Amino acid sequence: MERANFGSRLGMILATAGSAVGLGNIWRFPYTTGENGGAAFIVIYLVFILLLGIPGMVAEFVVGRSAQANAARAYRVAGGRLWGVTGYIGIFTATTILGFYSVVAGWCLQYLYASIVGDLSGDPAYVAQYFSEYSSEPLRPILWTLLFLLVTHLVVRSGVRKGIEKASKVLMPLLFVILIFLVVASCTLPGASEGIKFLFQPDFSKVTTNTLFEALGQAFFSLSLGCACLVTYSSYFSRKVRLLHSATQVAIIDTLVAILAGMMIFPAAFAVGVQPDSGPSLVFITLPNVFHQAFSAMPLVGHIISILFYALLTLAALTSTISMHEIGTAFVHEELKMSRGKGACVITAVCAVIGVFCSLSMGAVEGLTIGGKDLLDLLDDFTSQILLPLGSMLTCLYVGWRLPKTTVLNEFTNDGTLSARLFPVFLFLIRYLCPISIFVIFIHQLGLI
């Protein structure tokens, strides 16, 4: 069977960057930045991206391209069945995340529709009640979840070039155009300068040990490390792709989107005297009110801004769900010898079941909670606090200690055609600094430190 690959360098970069850019860039990064000293946090974050995030990406690229196979088989090539478990962990993690992530993506679709028809132009209390009532409904959230999964399914089943690459070439530029438009609209509001200062003026008095943990975790998890996504995508890379250069480009795009999101949110929020909250309340309660108040003198403009914002969220979610879906689809297609279309159907069906139960646990059905948490939050915590750190750490150990050094060197230098000057630095980071740092994140998230 001839293996698929990306048809162009631009398509490869946009698809890989799209896997990293997601809803977390739009709400988590801006809020975390403001909460932890603004520019001071960004500086710390960039240092961790340079020392840990980019090497971690290169490590996953090495695994994927050297094996030219799905994640499960990729780790078995040099590591045998024992290390193959790492690939299975990544596939399980990505499929689980896709299941509950699709529920939130479905909320974005609902809010895009609600913005278009003008349902979000009420007072703050109404908007808060709207989210509470909608998210706890039994039917509508499920329908939007399944619709989002269907769109993702149609892209992935079309293949790497005709589906993923083609979609990325449209979605990523469109995402940037909308984001930049919203940044300009937000930054030109009266009083917006206070929001810009909040984001970019360093406040080192807010920097604590927890700030370091937050920056460290953001650096790793914003780049889609630990869920076999980059392993799967890099298995479609050509031998001409420079892994370190590509990882750096993806990290720059991902960070740029996150910073632009902050420039979109904080100026508008400060212009109307609102302190942004984190999580779903920011995106589905606070920001609709912010847009309504900020552009109260120009209702039509506020209406358009709201539509574009939820279109932006939908695009960001879709670029991520496509990559997560491909991980499982590639596995089923290659390991179970199914056609790509049937493999995509299997993953879509599994994620649909997860999504339905997660949606119903939000209040539509009593008893779908564990330890007082709904299934969506429970799976979110389980994947982000346990599975992702575990997958990242095992990958670093695999590349640093199990994969033959000559293989790693050949991938890093494209079979000796590129300089090996930074290879010793990369190997040191992957063998020691990265796994130790991930372990520290792991025990911090478990509350042990």
Image (spheres, grey):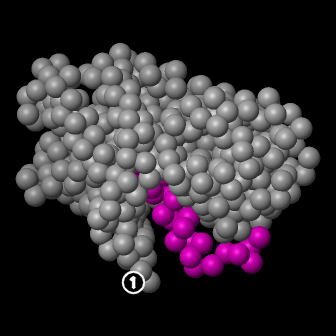
| Viewer-proximal residue among 42 and 371 | 371
Task: Identify the residue shown where x is 44% and y is 83%.
Answer: 449
Amino acid on which disc 1 is placed = Leu
Is 153 contained in the magenta span?
Answer: no
Asked if residue 448 lies left or right of residue 81, the reply is right
Hey, which quadrant is residue 44 in on the image?
bottom right
User: x, y percentage for residue 386?
Assistant: 32, 66
Residue 92 in view: yes
Please, what is the dominant secondary structure of the magenta stretch?
Answer: helix
Q: Position of residue 318 (x, y in %)?
A: 45, 34
Q: Which residue is mark 1?
A: 448
Disc 1 crowd, CA 10 A, few/some/many (<14, 14-19, 20+): few
Question: Which quarter of the rendered picture does the N terminus lie within?
Answer: top left
Residue 61 in view here: no
Q: Which residues are magenta?
A: 203-227
Which residue shows up at 37% across the image and 47% down it?
A: 138
Q: Residue at x 70, y 63 (%)?
A: 34
Residue 107 percent across, percent down from the top left: 49, 42
Residue at x 30%, y 19% (from the top left corner): 158
